[in-house]
């Protein structure tokens, strides 16, 4: 009885700000790459990122992936143990309509990237990078996708606690705003707006996947790389 009461009290004391903080930590984890690429590694390598050798670029990606992996594991464990939020719980099966909508969103992302790159992004990067760099770059994309998904998951949960409307892709809005603003400051306005739209679409895919973290991750990774 005492254990059940404690669990109930713990559930009732979890606030939307708790989950928003987790999402912001995931975003800050993404930002660690900026510190590595622009402040630490240029000192170690004696060259700016544009002038790194292939091996230095691979080491940068590996360092970033390790950092992002640690951040992701810590956040998932904290959400499950401290806030009783079942991150890895299997969601309900997706019907045909949901799969079709996911496919359309991925197709939309593919079309935008195709126009932006002037061709099939994966093929172009393979030709430019070569097999070895291509492999590590897409390993980097895999970890990046995971942190973007965590921003969506925690942002969605926070806003559902606040606004009680589970069908609104709040997580995608938060992901798009953080991602978009970051790209506006580090790249340009067009890239930032594209990130805003893509983040919103990624939030939609998370809901279409019935909040199943594994399915959502695979769908978002495909969407992210194409």
Image (tube, rainbow, N blue to C red):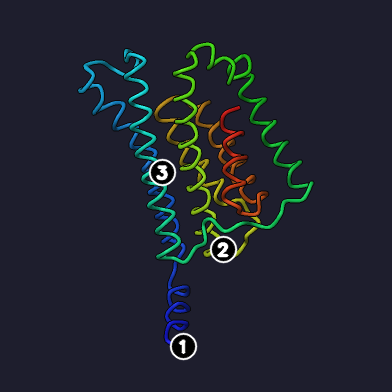
Answer above or below: position of 222 versus 122: below
x and y percent of residue 42 in the render? 25, 21
Answer above or below: position of 124 versus 139: above
x and y percent of residue 210 in the render? 65, 54
- The local crowd at label 3, few if under 14, some if 14 to 19, many if 20 or more residues have their Cα within 10 Å, is many
- The local crowd at label 2, few if under 14, some if 14 to 19, many if 20 or more residues have their Cα within 10 Å, is few
x and y percent of residue 41 in the render? 26, 25
Answer above or below: position of 54 versus 156: above
Q: CA distance from mark 3 to mark 1?
A: 39 Å
Give the mark nearest the N terminus, 2 or 3: 3
Q: Closer to the observer: label 1 or label 2? A: 1
Disc 2 is placed on an element classified as helix
Give the mark nearest the N terminus, 3 or 1: 1
Quarter of the image for the C terminus: give it: top right
Residue at label 1? 1
Quadrant in which residue 17 is drawn = bottom left
Q: Of 187 and 148, which appears nearest the observer?
A: 148
- The local crowd at label 1, few if under 14, some if 14 to 19, many if 20 or more residues have their Cα within 10 Å, is few
Q: Position of 63 compared to 18: left or right? A: left
Q: In the rendered structure, find residue 163 and report the number of the disc placed on it.
A: 2
Marks 2/3 in contact by CB < 8 Å: the verdict is no
Disc 3 is placed on an element classified as helix
Q: Closer to the observer: label 3 or label 1? A: 1
Q: CA distance from mark 1 to mark 2?
A: 31 Å
Q: In the rendered structure, find residue 27 and report the number of the disc placed on it.
A: 3
Give the residue at the far bottom of this rendering: 1
**Residue shown at the point (53%, 55%) measured from the top left:** 88
Give the residue at the far right of this rendering: 96
Q: Of 184 and 195, which appears nearest the observer?
A: 195
**Residue shown at the point (58%, 36%) measured from the top left:** 198
Q: CA distance from mark 2 to mark 3?
A: 22 Å
């Amino acid at each position: 009885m005492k254990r059940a009461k404690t669990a109930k009290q713990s559930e009732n004391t979890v606030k939307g700000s708790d989950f928003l903080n987790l999402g912001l930590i995931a975003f800050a984890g993404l930002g660690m790459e900026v510190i590595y690429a622009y402040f630490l590694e240029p000192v170690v390598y004696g060259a700016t990122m544009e002038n790194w050798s292939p091996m230095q670029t691979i080491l940068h990606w590996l360092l970033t992936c390790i950092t992002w992996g640690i951040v992701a594991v810590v956040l998932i464990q904290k959400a499950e143990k401290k806030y009783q939020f079942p991150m890895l719980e299997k969601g309900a099966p997706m019907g045909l309509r949901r799969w079709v909508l996911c496919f359309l969103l991925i197709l939309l992302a593919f079309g935008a990237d195709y126009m932006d790159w002037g061709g099939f992004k994966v093929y172009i990067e393979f030709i430019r990078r070569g097999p070895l760099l291509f492999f590590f770059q897409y390993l980097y994309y895999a970890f990046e996708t995971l942190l973007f998904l965590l921003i969506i998951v925690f942002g969605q949960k926070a806003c559902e606690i606040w606004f009680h409307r589970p069908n609104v892709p709040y997580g995608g809005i938060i992901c798009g705003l953080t991602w978009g603003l970051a790209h506006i400051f580090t790249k340009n306005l067009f890239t930032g707006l594209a990130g805003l739209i893509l983040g919103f679409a990624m939030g939609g895919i998370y809901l279409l996947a019935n909040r199943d973290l594994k399915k959502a991750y695979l769908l978002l990774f495909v969407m992210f790389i194409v």
